[in-house]
Amino acid sequence: MDSTKLHELLQAVRSGDVSPDEAVSRLRHMPFEDLGFARIDHHRRVRSGMPEVIFSQGKTPAQVSKIFKHMAAQGGNVLATRATPEHFRAVKKIVRKSEYRELARAIVLKQDPTAYGKGTIVVISAGTSDIPVAEEALVTAEIMGNEVAHLYDVGVAGIHRLLAGREVMEKARVIIVCAGMEGALPSVVGGLARVPVIAVPTSVGYGASFDGLAALLGMLNSCASNVSVVNIDNGFGAGYVASMINRL
Amino acid sequence: MDSTKLHELLQAVRSGDVSPDEAVSRLRHMPFEDLGFARIDHHRRVRSGMPEVIFSQGKTPAQVSKIFKHMAAQGGNVLATRATPEHFRAVKKIVRKSEYRELARAIVLKQDPTAYGKGTIVVISAGTSDIPVAEEALVTAEIMGNEVAHLYDVGVAGIHRLLAGREVMEKARVIIVCAGMEGALPSVVGGLARVPVIAVPTSVGYGASFDGLAALLGMLNSCASNVSVVNIDNGFGAGYVASMINRL
Amino acid sequence: MDSTKLHELLQAVRSGDVSPDEAVSRLRHMPFEDLGFARIDHHRRVRSGMPEVIFSQGKTPAQVSKIFKHMAAQGGNVLATRATPEHFRAVKKIVRKSEYRELARAIVLKQDPTAYGKGTIVVISAGTSDIPVAEEALVTAEIMGNEVAHLYDVGVAGIHRLLAGREVMEKARVIIVCAGMEGALPSVVGGLARVPVIAVPTSVGYGASFDGLAALLGMLNSCASNVSVVNIDNGFGAGYVASMINRL
Amino acid sequence: MDSTKLHELLQAVRSGDVSPDEAVSRLRHMPFEDLGFARIDHHRRVRSGMPEVIFSQGKTPAQVSKIFKHMAAQGGNVLATRATPEHFRAVKKIVRKSEYRELARAIVLKQDPTAYGKGTIVVISAGTSDIPVAEEALVTAEIMGNEVAHLYDVGVAGIHRLLAGREVMEKARVIIVCAGMEGALPSVVGGLARVPVIAVPTSVGYGASFDGLAALLGMLNSCASNVSVVNIDNGFGAGYVASMINRL
Amino acid sequence: MDSTKLHELLQAVRSGDVSPDEAVSRLRHMPFEDLGFARIDHHRRVRSGMPEVIFSQGKTPAQVSKIFKHMAAQGGNVLATRATPEHFRAVKKIVRKSEYRELARAIVLKQDPTAYGKGTIVVISAGTSDIPVAEEALVTAEIMGNEVAHLYDVGVAGIHRLLAGREVMEKARVIIVCAGMEGALPSVVGGLARVPVIAVPTSVGYGASFDGLAALLGMLNSCASNVSVVNIDNGFGAGYVASMINRL
Amino acid sequence: MDSTKLHELLQAVRSGDVSPDEAVSRLRHMPFEDLGFARIDHHRRVRSGMPEVIFSQGKTPAQVSKIFKHMAAQGGNVLATRATPEHFRAVKKIVRKSEYRELARAIVLKQDPTAYGKGTIVVISAGTSDIPVAEEALVTAEIMGNEVAHLYDVGVAGIHRLLAGREVMEKARVIIVCAGMEGALPSVVGGLARVPVIAVPTSVGYGASFDGLAALLGMLNSCASNVSVVNIDNGFGAGYVASMINRL
Amino acid sequence: MDSTKLHELLQAVRSGDVSPDEAVSRLRHMPFEDLGFARIDHHRRVRSGMPEVIFSQGKTPAQVSKIFKHMAAQGGNVLATRATPEHFRAVKKIVRKSEYRELARAIVLKQDPTAYGKGTIVVISAGTSDIPVAEEALVTAEIMGNEVAHLYDVGVAGIHRLLAGREVMEKARVIIVCAGMEGALPSVVGGLARVPVIAVPTSVGYGASFDGLAALLGMLNSCASNVSVVNIDNGFGAGYVASMINRL
Amino acid sequence: MDSTKLHELLQAVRSGDVSPDEAVSRLRHMPFEDLGFARIDHHRRVRSGMPEVIFSQGKTPAQVSKIFKHMAAQGGNVLATRATPEHFRAVKKIVRKSEYRELARAIVLKQDPTAYGKGTIVVISAGTSDIPVAEEALVTAEIMGNEVAHLYDVGVAGIHRLLAGREVMEKARVIIVCAGMEGALPSVVGGLARVPVIAVPTSVGYGASFDGLAALLGMLNSCASNVSVVNIDNGFGAGYVASMINRL
């Protein structure tokens, strides 16, 4: 039962064709969705500057480009994560203004220049191998309308490098920290910063890093209280959470 | 070398008693802390309304009451988590205005009535057994100067109960979701809400819940993008992160 | 907005006090629950012979007896699982007709004699230590209105004992198999039977049984295709699933 | 000793050539199988509409096609799971009426049109990546003689989509739910439905999904009591269990 | 149908009262057990010198003494493992000749002096904390009729102690090695010995020993090819396997 | 210091050129190996019919053929496990009498026809996919001079097939059981047999089999006391242990 | 055969009573230990200042005091780790000069004042809860004859506290770092220091710390190259390794 | 603010252009790094003979050769670990004096012949498959200016081989032990040696070795007190730690 049918029902109540009792009974079995809540959801996404997002991994270039085109037509920004150069070539043919962020493995289309975020999101990474995840977070934050800055290769074994970057850190309204191996960086950053820190464990490492498990456990046990954690290698999720916070 | 000593050194430079070269050399070996950064930290905590916090577990009632008294003297709010009634009795004798929040297993002292948070923090829990963790989050948020509200016993197996609570959820600027067993609630809440969701896995469950591991993994893999996670049973951490976000 | 309010709204539509447009708008914001779905749920549970269930573990005797009394007043059967003799003493004082099933660690109240199940549910256990879990499944099935039978201590290392019990097995419309240690029994039973088998791993064992993990993994990997699995020690869940199947 | 030999032995008893004592002794060492039980098994499978099934993974196209042909000759339905297009090409050459269900990665041969199931089996999946597992379940149920329906891409982060599909769900006599990542969908479906729910964790996800472990643990800890679980990615098993239930 | 009934049936065949065809049909449904196989099992255990065994853990003193008495009446040896002094006091009252082996936590009754084993079983332990498990293995081997010897506290970090015990080792027909912590001893013993080595990981250790997991994995990965492994702390199992080998 | 040097030293003692004190001192630093123990080891291996063994995995065809040739020259049997057809082609060129056992992925050279084993080793496998591991065990036992027999595809879900093979089982002096998935077969076989059972978990399975972990844990928790276990997929180890037992 | 017997044998060779050939043969079977190597070991321990050590956990006060007395008689230092006050009371009665280090849970007897270490061993701990493990390391280092210093409660979330302690750190020849939770401190210390760092994960934490596993994995994955790790809570091991290094 | 700027500031203080108060304020915000600490770090590395190190895995040949060239220009030794022949070809073109150590998978450039280490570092490996890791440790130690020796293929199942190598072991000031499978070798070596032992678990093995986890746990639980552990396959880390110790 959609809005039209609801109108008809209520008209029938008004005209006396349907009794209020009967109408109550019919309404009780009316599917939730058809009241229009879901439709509002879809509209709200675009209006609010949330990008449409495609997780490209496991999809063919043809599939990604088809979805991308469809999303681009909504008028908002579009983001395709975990995209290969092959994915991009297919998208580029159809959506000429799309760009490829190689480090982030992301395809982006910027159609909405609005600055939705109130402050700067700073992305910090421990090692150079963590950069793809960090860049995914950065691109996500950017495409969602935030000022961004970054501080890379400031692992805890050379703490002076991190301290040297304090000025950048102090500009942040939200901080994202990406680290593999022992995943210690969010604790140190969390201790230095006065803002929320989103920690992203990466699968960088070998042996007892167990594909990011060591970093994940480290971050969950952070002795800094302003740290919360997302899934291993989930740069997108971190960028999304940070953006949502930065809009508050 | 603290600020006083730094002043003296600079005065000596001015007076010519110490050459600039010599001063550079002395400054190079100057401990970081003594420049006053750390002391500022301590002051800032109190000034900013962050409560002083004691993790009571593993401490004797005598230890907790002694630390509590010391902290109370700073003039800000004080919070002791994981506190037993025995802990409270010891504290109560010394700090008469302290109160015990039984469900939260927390001792609180409210001395600072300032509202630091800009909106409401809503705490949601899946089952009645998750309430101690949820209450710890709630009390933490409250003692840090936030409006709080809660919605308990709205597990995903009875989704209508959660939907019935939408009104409460929509008031939230930040949401905390506590759940044990399969830990599915943050995904559902994350999908319904437009604000950051802090997920707290609890150790509620048995068998293959593996003391909260199942809930933890579930939350880390949430298909809702606005969810980040803290440690198992870490209600305090969730309340702290949420408070920090709510001040932005 | 509950049914009464819905009636009032529809009367207002009929009388012309509220336009259909206005009514659509109000209905769109109407909370789901208040349409009465949830209340119907509660009613349906009792009408359908599903017992009201209390998970007693972690609750005080006073809490359990209070909830039990409340549930007993609904008129259907009541089941309290993981109940100690202390729990029972408290319940017995208030609900005189309640009984304690010691092996199953369950308190039951039978008020509804209806046979909801169409066939017999047979509960099989591997060792004598698995009997508490098996009995919990049995009592659950019984209190939900099923014919039940059992076959205990028929572990796979003495396969002739199981084969000797084939007659009992062949009476089953649904079979529940409880086993700890290597958890092999469901595969053997699944191979012999032509009906759905619900496997319950138990935490019986030591060392590399890892509190039921070995049995759980064994059952999930069963080479018999008619086996599905519930949580470790979850006799109640198995009894519930089996009952639901037996009503079809 | 098969039936013929048993007859001969009994004839010899009748004729007095073999004494009853001697016959008892010989019978005691008589292999179980040769009494014909096993042979009945094979016959019963075909007569009962259970399909013959091949697990193609790890087998060559030649092996699969040879077994397929042999099974097809029994006259019942045949199902080859985890089959590649290469497997199908080999089968197609020999069994012309065989079909390839690409999404399900299954080769099917329908020779028996009997409807063995009494109601409809509904297959629900959380995300589009879970569809191969869901389709394997669907095809299995179909080839075993059941009415089937499905509801795909109704993950818990967009709960309105699931609620919109309630009508389909309510037709079900048995429900199969396939979900990766946090595996929360079976709990929500289990709470909404009044029928047995078979949960299939899928290996969809990354990082802390640990190849389906997160979803598996989530489902085992489901707070909905009518849920039982099969192995990760075991769409076939779920379809088989559901079919067995639907015949009751 | 037991032997008597089988005789009656065959007599009826002989007399012509039952046709061979009818007899075949009846035999086909005859339960396996009743042919007497299982009864033979029970008899064989006693005749063969295998002790009757009780796993005392989780049983009350009354239960253990009752079972013990029943088993003692069969005339063979009896062994109760994981028995406390309380268990023993209860048994002693009823079976006066029973003895308590304190180190092994075992109650034994020797009624059968037969030497079933052909050679000596040598039990080796790494540390003094492994002795309870080693003694359980030793007592099991002894009560099953084997010559036994032992070599304790010969861990791999003092390899000369083990080498000094070579003489004892060389007397062995089968060797049992019990070790916790890193579980390295079976590899060294396996390399020195020319006989089968049964390795028993013990739960001795702390931290990353994970209750015996480290030792278990170490033993399963032994670079000595003559090593096989039983469950953590399963001294009884090792003694049983070794005894079975020693009878060959 | 080898035997020759030892002789020279003792001659010098006899002649008085070296004092007994000096000789004691020199002997104390004498390397263990040079006393000839190790050399005896190498000789003993060949004399005793233990085959020389090469683990081919990770070695080039050239490396395997070179080692194989060297070992063949010792005159005993030679076994190369985990060998590919490429490995075999390289070996065949140099050692013409070598043979490839395709199912077992093994290259063998039989030069020593002696029957070292006293009885028959029976190898049992649960499924057809377990056959490579079972064949590796079989070939190992054979090349070590044992009578062998096998019973394949007798998984526990079709228990009658196993029971039908009892005759083969009863010929065994030692039994090897290979099974993946739930690894239940050794428990059933262990319960039926009166001889030592060596269990080999295989990595056959998917999802929650976790590459053989489920089968491994199942076997370690076997409720049959005559079962001991080797590493996942370690057919060679099982064959070796069984051979060592069969020589006793 | 000990040294005396060896002398006798050589005298017999000299006198001609035993031929060199016969002597070679006898020597070949001579047990390794009896050549005196092991006895030298025992002597060397005392002479070298290595303390005699007792792991008290799991031992009775009577056992500990008996062993302690025996060891004290050797004249060197004695250390009993994991000792309770009860253990100490028993020891104190017999060895009057023994002392109890409460924080370290250690009983010590200092009889040997020699400074075996060449520099200072600095023990650093992250939180106050890590102090028992840190003190165990400190006492071990001290009793083995080292200068010691410590720096406690300098966790990474307050990095300025650690930096303020640089002066202490720079005095170190070897550093021991004890940390629970995320175990990040060794990486930071390792990056600041130019000396070997021994990392000790502690079981301090809750939830996803999994009793020290998170800290252990973090330390094994340290991005600082001068870090090596010992077992969880193994303060003694760290103190021992550090002492051995400090003697070089 | 670097040293120059610091000089200028102090000159301005002296000249009276900047007041001491203003100078204190500016100094308080002065970045740590710019005080010159970090620069000293970089210089110190080269001066101290620590090699510059590249982790080649995951880098392109072009990237590795570019970094290598840059590092070579500093004048010290250079080490590239986990390097393929392709990496080497690219480096060789640019840095002619570079060499490839094939077994160690390392590219080295020796420009600094200084012997920084005081004694010999001995590298021991259990099996031939552990040699790549052992060689990485060896090359690292060598390039850091140490005397090195090795002892390969001395696994614990043939303990005489290890004992035969005691002479080599006794020359060591530090020992590195590399072992996969059960990882037992460090315990045996630790028991024989009087020097620090660095244990390196390798991922050599299969099945229950779980890619080095078994060896790692074994080594962490070593019963020899002089053993500390680095990450799985981390030959470089072991060489680095050992070198640091050997310089003391």
Image (tube, coloured by chain):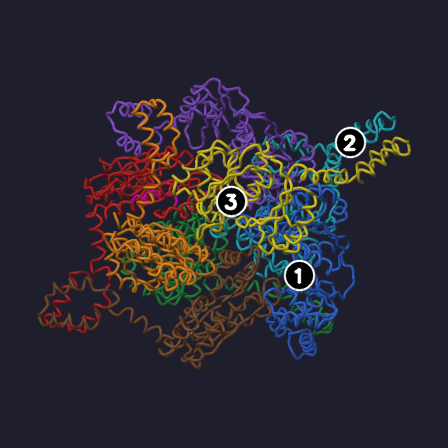
Chain colours: A cyan, B blue, C yellow, D purple, E orange, F red, G brown, H green
Magenta stretch: helix, strand or loop mostly: helix
Q: How far is mark 1 from mark 2, CA to CA? A: 47 Å
Quadrant of the frame with the N terminus of chain C: top right
Above or below — where is H245 with respect to F211?
Answer: below
In the rendered image, which residue does mark 2 sit on?
A25
Q: Nearer the viewer, mark 1 or mark 2?
A: 2
Above or below — where is D190 with respect to C213?
Answer: above
In the image, which disc is placed on residue B105? 1
Q: Are marks 2 and 3 on the same chain?
A: no
Q: How far is mark 2 from mark 3, CA to CA? A: 44 Å
In the rendered image, which residue does mark 3 sit on?
C134
Chain under callout 1: B
Number of marks in picture: 3
Q: Say which element carries label 2.
A: helix
Q: Are marks 1 and 2 on the same chain?
A: no
Q: Disc 2 marks which amino acid?
A: Ser
**Magenta-drawn segment:** F232-239
Chain under callout 2: A
Q: Are marks 1 and 2 in contact (CB under 8 Å)?
A: no
Instruction: Let me know if residue F22 appears in the view.
Output: yes
